[in-house]
Amino acid sequence: MAVTIQQIADAAGVSRGTVDRALNHRGRISPEAAERIYRIAEEMGYVHRARKKNPNKKIKIGVVTQLCKSSFMLEINRGIQEAREELKHRGIELLIEERESVDEQEQLDAIDRLAERGICALAVMPVDCELIRTRLNSLAVERNIPIVTFNSDIVGTKRLCFVGMDNHRSGRTAAGLLGMLTGGEGKVLVITGHFSSALNNQRVDGFVEEIKRSYPKLQIAGVQASFNHTAEVEKIIESTLLNVSGINAVFSVSGGQGGIGKAFEKLRLEKRPFVVIYDQTPKNEKIIQEKIADFLIDQNGFEQGYRPPFLLANYLMKGQLPAAEFLYTDIVIKTKYNL
């Protein structure tokens, strides 16, 4: 015999309405009470009515990415595809919208397309702007669509949690590495991807903060945006090293890092600056192995792509909440010796 909401209510010692609100994620109910009801429902073998009516109908979870052609996305995409294959066996379909840019209207269109296709939940690498913030809150509040952000986060939204690197802390980590390499003196050039990227800005902010605190004699020679283009990174380094004396360090926050070696080769430097880059990709491994850069900070992209769909699946199927609001991946420091 199928388990009823009334039976769960009796077992939990609450009203039928409270159970209904908890299982359907609507109305006001404390997280503790909701978690207890989810657990009891699962132990009793309760099957949600949506699954009861449509046992063969797949639950749809939307995934929206940005900068999909960038090298750092290789591992994130691998994680998403791995999750997609595994979730098929649970009757869950991932609908993926990949975007090449950080254009807010493009991302909004992608989110709206997924909503029209009837998604039950959404994992998104959000563009940090009011347009996206408003739409995500609308989905969460008006349509009861649970949302998990990954890789990049967006403040002021009713998302369940964020999965990704503590980017501010990783920037401080990079500052510590370059501070030690330079002896805390000289000038450092900072190259970011997009000034509109919250992720990039957090890394830069953490870096500058730690340099000022711990290495006051190490000057910031400028922060320039490359838009993740190799040619632009090359141009920035070449121009800056020719026109600014005393630069002995480069901190590259985002993509296009292949331009570093090209600039060094063109300049024919007797001694190159110390360099810290991000993301363990085949191209960046080569940069480390060829001694163009000293350290690589990796953010475990596979986990960032793989974990959000499962968090949303467990929330939809079991009512299981994420363990914390911020689920940070490891900050991993790589050299040529431990790639």
Image: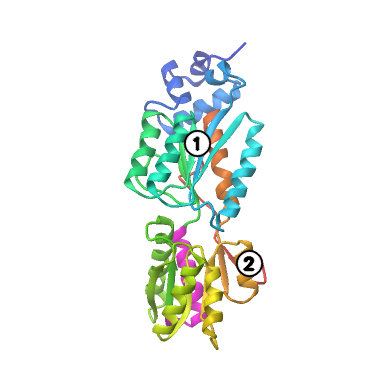
Q: Residues within 10 Å of mark 1 (few under 14, many from 20)?
A: some
Identify the residue at image location x=65%, y=73%.
289
Q: Is residue 55 above or below residue 156?
A: above
Please identify the residue farthest to the top as the structure is shown: 1
Q: Residues within 10 Å of mark 2 (few under 14, many from 20)?
A: some
**Do labels 1 and 2 touch, CB within 8 Å?**
no
Which image quadrant is residue 288 in?
Answer: bottom right
Identify the residue at image location x=46%, y=24%.
24
Give how far across and how far down residue 250 sits, in percent: 48, 75
- The tag earlier along the polypeptide, 1 or 2, is 2
Q: How is the image coloured?
A: rainbow
Side of 286 where 40 appears, left or right: left
Identify the residue at image location x=43%, y=57%.
199
Residue 285 badge: 2
Which sits in the foreground, 158 or 11?
Answer: 158
The nearer-to-camera label among 1 and 2 is 2
| Predominant SS along the magenta part | helix
Give how far across and how far down residue 293 sits, in percent: 57, 74
Dot 1 amino acid type: Leu
* Kind of element beneath mark 1: loop
Residue 197 badge: none
Q: Is residue 318 above or below residue 261?
A: above
Magenta range is 167-187
**Picture quarter with the N terminus:** top right
Side of 336 where 182 appears, left or right: left
Residue 321 badge: 1
* Kind of element beneath mark 2: helix
Give the Cα distance between marks 1 and 2: 37 Å
Dot 2 amino acid type: Glu
Q: Is residue 215 above or below residue 40?
A: below
Identify the residue at image location x=67%, y=71%.
337
